[in-house]
Amino acid sequence: MVDDVAPAVLNVAEKCYDLPTLKGTLGPDVVDVRQLYGEADIFTYDPSFGSTASCESKITYIDGDKGILLHRGYPIDELAKKSNFLEVAYLLLYGDLPTASEYAAFECNITYHTMLHAQFDRFFEGFRRDAHPMGVLTGTIGALSAFYPDSIDVSDPKQREISTHRLIAKMPTIAARAFKYWSGQPFISPRNNLTYAENFLRMCFAVPAEDYVSNPVLTRAMDRIFILHADHEQNASTSTVRMSGSSGANPFACIAAGIACLWGPAHGGANEEALNMLKEIGTVDRIPEYVQGVKDRKYRLMGFGHRVYKNYDPRAKVMQETAHEVLDELGKHDEPLLKVAMELEKIALHDDYFVERKLYPNVDFYSGITLSAMGFPPEMFTVLFALARTVGWVAQWREMIEDPHRRIARPRQLYTGETQRAYTPIEERG
């Protein structure tokens, strides 16, 4: 970050205030208003923080107008096609792609942290059998601090490193257990000779009655889905993690807060909504009727458009290819929902109504179809999102904790309530 750009000038009540203008390596310049309240006694007003940079970060960059997503400078599509999830995790955490020896050490660390404390499995029994897996995930991740109190001192770099590895390693095990518990099946323990994605799929779909055979196409698809969801700049859940962490809360509590935020249908639940929309349409011949309903504002077009992207979501292109690979491998290339999705995408990309509004397909459009074909119910979609996003959350949390200028987050408000008034005893109120 540099601040040698000409300052912005703000005129308030006939007084002028010079506001420093900061310049990042990419993206728009930022007007620094940190001293504005102290100097001018006014706040800025930006509900939902759509025009406010809440932090300085070196992790992820998005250019929504151009459809660009970079992790530490690397394009997301290149990482999804050439890398693997643990290598991307290392990149997000430490800033550079690992050497062969660095990767081997990191992979070993994550693999040997996948087991859970023996008493942890009893914790699941406190939930109802029909409890939503996201509710189970939120509670169990928060409980990790009670099982691993030796890694909750955020001021200790060694403990931060241990908690980093534990969160990334144990999240697949806990997510799979949430799935198994919801399904009424016995838990499957992790295996140290399997890859991250392969291990997760086995813990989800293996049963004691028969051997589990890994499918390399599905394993690669799962790994790619994890990569595509690993981080996405300062979205609602990431901002929640950072805000929670600004108070010095332990990392397990911060990630649990992020999971709770992700559970919202406007955030992590979008892929489930997109799948439900495709099911509602049902067949290709019903698409024109549905599209007209969208134009008439009778229906919502789920899986299209994005708060940030005003171009084709770069993750969506990779997700589309992955969907075809999975459906072909499983012999579901004639899947009706895929036909509906492809035709709907074709119409949306050429219809003036959608083009003018920049309603391009996003990553959620194809991910729901893919996950459903792999055997996951809609209740697990957001759990898988949280599993992948844990890496980004932890990377962002570490960056925030290690910032020497860190302060506890404290947004301001525009108060529009009553002015001061006197208390009236209840017997005197009319």
Image: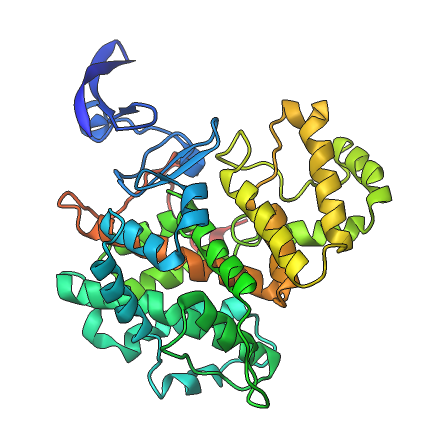
Position above or below: 276 against 167: above
Q: Residue at x 53, y 73 (%)?
A: 214
> Which one is in front, 158 or 408?
158
Q: Position of residue 80 (x, y in %)?
A: 45, 48
The percent coordinates of residue 90 (x first, y second) are: 29, 55
Left or right of 330 in this view: 148: left
Residue 398 showing in the rendered view = yes
Above-or-below relation of 276 to 288: below
Q: Relative to the observer, which residue lies in front, 368 or 146?
A: 368
Does residue 250 appear in this view? no
Picture layout, residue 175 above or below residue 269: below
User: In x, y percent, where is residue 150?
Assistant: 19, 75
Q: Quadrant of residue 353?
A: top right
Q: Quadrant of residue 210?
A: bottom right
Farthest residue toward the right? 285
**Color style of the picture:** rainbow
Q: Where is residue 193 in the image (x, y as percent from the top left)?
A: 37, 76
Q: Which residue lies furthest to the top in this view?
A: 14
Q: Is residue 363 above or below residue 49?
A: below
Residue at image position (53%, 29%) is 310
Q: Is residue 98 left or right of residue 376?
A: left
Name the residue: 27% across, 49% down. 97
